[in-house]
Amino acid sequence: MRKGITPVVAMILLLMMTVAAAGAAFAWTQGIITGQQEDVETELDTEITVRDMQCASDGTVDFFLDNTGSATVSANNTVSVYLYSVSTGDLVNTTDTSRQGGDMEPGDAWDSTVSFDSADMDNGIDYEIEFEFPNQGSYSVSGTCQAE
């Protein structure tokens, strides 16, 4: 009788190890794919609309945003606000704000004021204001107003 593992037993062990490695690789890639799908679904369900926006030459912008999507928007963390000149497309200034009421549930509204340097806004000039929600996959929405 020979000592050691016979070729048949060795082949069965190799097949079992191969199947186990393939199963582990499959489970790992499924976890990655599922996470990416959830991120994309959240981004697709995110929809914020600008209901109204008013710019003043003192640098203040009153804005009214509505969550018209089906996803909760995380707005209690920093929301970046960018001020662009419509005529040149240049970034004039930026600031940050946050919603004091916490997250925006579907159907919620957010009305607030942000302040820029008064030297940045001139009477009669059109400005584009962009709001970026970094917790929503850098989702952004913008609207225009004329400084008065």
Image (tube, rainbow, N blue to C red):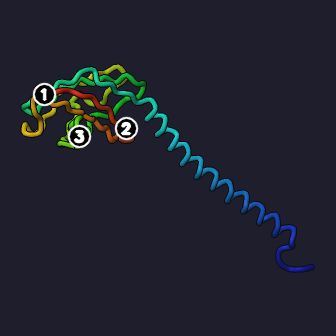
Q: What is the secondary structure assignment of the residue under circle 1?
A: loop
Q: For the residues marked 1 and 3, what is the alpha-carbon distance in whole angstroms? A: 15 Å
Query: Are circles 1 and 2 on residues that touch, CB within 8 Å?
Result: no
Q: Is residue 78 visible to the viewer in this orientation of the structure?
A: no
In this view, the mark in front (1 or 2):
1
Residue beneath disc 3: 88
The kind of residue tagged 1 is: Gly
Residue beneath disc 2: 136
Decide if residue 135 is on the left or right side of residue 10: left
Based on the displayed image, in which of its 4 quarters is residue 111 positioned? top left
In the image, residue 77 lies at what x, y percent? 26, 39
Q: What is the secondary structure assignment of the residue under circle 3?
A: loop
Query: Quick one: label 1 or label 2, which is nearer the N terminus?
Result: 1
Residue beneath disc 1: 124
Based on the displayed image, in which of its 4 quarters is residue 66 positioned? top left
Decide if residue 89 is on the left or right side of residue 35: left
In the image, residue 11 lies at what x, y percent? 82, 67
